[in-house]
Every structure is written in structure tokens, then in C-alpha cells.
Amino acid sequence: MNIHEYQAKEILKNFGLPVLKGKSYNKKIDTLEIDIADLKGPPWVVKSQIHAGGRGAGHFKDSFNDKGGVQVIFEKDKVFSIATSMMGNVLITKQTGETGKRVNRIFIEEGCDIEREFYLSLLVDRNNSKVMMMISAAGGMDIEEVAATNPEKIINIYFTKYTDITLDENLQTKLEITKNQFDELTLIINKLLDAFTSIDASTIEINPLVLNKQDSFVVLDAKISLDDNALFRHPEIAELKDLTEEDPLELQAAEHNMNYVKLDGSIGCMVNGAGLAMATMDIIKQFGEEPANFLDLGGTANKDRVIMGFKTIQSDPNVKSILINIFGGIIHCDMIANGIIEAVKELDFKLPLVVRFQGTNAKEGKDIINNSDLGLISIDDFTEAAKKVVELAKV
Ligand code: GDP
Ligand code: MN
């Protein structure tokens, strides 16, 4: 799960990290009342809150000035108009793709006199089963660019413990900072590690970590991703989920206890069991097409869930054909077959459909599909079924 910058900063503040004072707004434009009397300025910084980076260098679909999704403003009376122009507007950045993301939240922060910009992130390195820190004096700008063109400017450090850590002194030299700054940085990294482990984060990225003109470090931007599997331990963080940032189809499927992940291909898959779903995706790729989704109906799939699955797949305009691959264990294939027929009729479903049944009542299920007069195709063999659905996607 990802959270917004303003939420990430609120969390980091509680762990003693230096963040600037700010206020977040999510009201509709006509009721937006901004009060920045208690924020030090000028300047103030108006920041679009979307789950994507590169905001500063991005642009708005409905453009109102030549700046991006992060704007430093020196005139107090302009803060309101800029915030209003951002709210509800669509921000396009390197990370959002051409469609961009609607800005539903604005964060207004006290400005900061930047002396230097560093990059600092913590992440779980699965290959080494350790938390890794990436740090660089080339922060602020596009770190992916730095990684591609000057990888030596990014220093990777692995931690073997997460409290009371000390850093090798050559890091001070590499970052070209003073002893005092190095000590302050060490303190910040300790606090960040505390935050990271306490909230079960999978990434915390600070870009930039600023050294201001008063010679203190400030967390100027913060991105936190959390481990979904540990969210149950942090109900107060789970609540921060912004549903407007989630894929609506994935949300809808989750409400019905189905596991749906939207992908970019053209073949819709409806399968029971995660392993079979993976195998189904693999075989589609093997025959040269790409799956449009991962959809696991679950081991206790029933008719309602099949209908819901159809609705979910149907709302994806990229889907050209569908493969339903069901292994009847606890669930019976004939029951699923009836669900398919009902769904096709109810939704007036027109896309080509290949059904493969194996296991409990597979024969009965197949008969139902073959006798339906709906033009559904039933194929027993996995390979043949996959070939057929790929072929149908191409016509
Ligand atoms: P991102 O583009 O989505 O990563 O958004 P950031 O929050 O990192 O902001 C982009 C850039 O705006 C930063 O790298 C800074 O250079 C600049 N910026 C952000 N806040 C301030 C500020 O308070 N003062 C000044 N001068 N620049 C800022
Ligand atoms: Mn940033």
C-alpha cells in the first residue's frame, strides 16, 4: 500500500524526523478555504498529492501556468489560486503515463532555503534478506537518471541491525559533508530505520533530503510503501488508504473476496486457485499473447462470484477473448457452468469464450456449456484451450 506525501510526513514526524509544518486539503474547489496564517512564509510550497513521483517536473492537463505539480510561491494571495487550480486538475508526470492522475488532495507547506539536495531511501533487499539504504549527494532530481548515467554516485549500504547504527566515516567524505552534518545524518538514519521497522515499511524514499541554509537536514519529500501483509498490525495506517488512488476494478474484486490484478494484455482469465491462474497466464504468454488480468475466483468460487468475475473482466476494454480454466475440487464444474451461462445472458456478453473444466463434475459442466447455444467453446486440453483463446483474440 502506498500513502501520500503529507501522510508519510506525519508518520515520520512522530519518529522525530525533521519535517516542515504543512496543512493538507481535500475539499471541493468551491468550498476550499485555505488558511495559511500559521505557516511561516514566504515562500509557501503548494504540492499536489498523488501516488506518483516526478510531480515537480510534471505538467497539468488543464494548464494554468508553466510550472508543475510542486510550486514554490512567494505572494501569499497566490497560494489560494494556485491550490485551487491544482485541485481536481489532472497532473501528468514521468511516472503517471499520458493519462495522468487527478489531484484530489493538496498539501501546503512552509518553504525552505535549500543549500543541498540529497537522496536517501530504505528498502527491503529480498536477495540479501536485509534492509538496504541508498544514499546520494545527487538528490532532488531524477534519481533513475542518476542510476542510469552515474551509478557510482549512489552508495548502497546494507544493515545487519536496525538500532544504534553507526556509519563508516568514508561516507562523510563521499557525501562531502562536515563532521557535524555527518553526525546529524547518522541520527536521521537511525530514526528512519526505527520508523521503517516499526511500521513494516517496504520502502521509504526521501528525495530530496535537504540541507538548508541554516545547516540542518530537512525531509522535503517523502514516499512510503507499506507491506500489505503486515497492515493488520497497523490499523491506523491501513486507514490512510486513499481509495481514489486504487484501481476501481481491483477494489471491486477485493470486496467480493476475489483476487484480481489488472494487466496490460488482451486475454481475460478467470481461474480458481492462484497456482492454476499463474499457469494459465504462463501458457497464454507461451502462445504469444499477454493476459489482461490475473483473476483467482478462490477455492470456494460460486455462481455469484463468476458473475462478478465477468463484470470485472468486461469493464476492461482491452480484453479480446476469455479463457475460463476451472479445476473442480470442492466446487463443482456444473455449478460454475451454470454461473457462466447466467452471466453471459445477464450481461449480454459478446466476447469469444473458451472454457476448460477438469475435476469434479467436469463432464456435466462441459455438457451444459456445449448445449447452451451461446457459442461458447469447451475444450478439455489445457494446451488446446490456450491455443484457441489466443487465436480468438487475434480475429
Ligand atoms: P517530486 O517532483 O514529486 O519528487 O516532488 P518534490 O516534493 O521532491 O519537489 C520537487 C522539487 O521541488 C524538490 O526537489 C525541490 O527542489 C523543490 N522544492 C520543494 N519544496 C521546496 C521548498 O520549500 N523550497 C524550494 N526552494 N524548493 C522546493
Ligand atoms: Mn521528490
Image: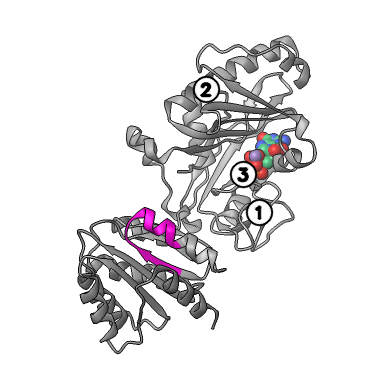
Residue 78 appears left or right of 129: right
Residue situated in front as seen by the camera: 392 or 190: 392
Residue 93 numbered tag: 1
Describe the element under mark 1 as helix, strand or loop.
loop
Return the mark for residue 198.
Answer: none
Residue 380 in view (yes/no):
yes
Q: Residues within 10 Å of mark 2 (few under 14, many from 20)?
A: many
Question: What residue is at 20 percent from the left and 76 percent from the top?
Answer: 364
Mark 2 sits on what residue?
A: 193
Which residue does the image show at 33% across and 32% down from the upper left?
A: 233
Please, what secondary structure does the residue beneath circle 2 have?
A: helix
- Dividing the picture into quadrants, the one containing residue 305 is bottom left
Which residue: 48% across, 32% down? Answer: 10
Whether the residues at callouts 3 and 1 have beta carbons within 8 Å, the answer is no
Q: Residue furthest bottom?
A: 373
Residue 255, image x and y in percent?
30, 56
Specify the quadrant of the image occupied by residue 87.
bottom right
Amino acid beneath label 2: Leu
Estimate the spatial distance between the alpha carbons at disc 3 and disc 2, rounded to whole Å: 28 Å
Q: Position of residue 300 (x, y in %)?
A: 23, 58
**Disc 2 to disc 1, how far (Cα)?**
29 Å
In-image side of 370 versus 63 (left or right)? left
Quadrant for ligand 1? Answer: top right
6 horizontally vs 356: left or right: right
Helix, strand or loop under label 3: strand
**Residue annotated with mark 3:** 46
Q: Amino acid at mark 1?
A: Thr
Amino acid at circle 3: Val
- Give the mark, 2 or 1, whose residue is nearer the N terminus: 1
Q: Which residues are magenta?
A: 268-280
Give the number of the mark in front: 2 or 1: 2
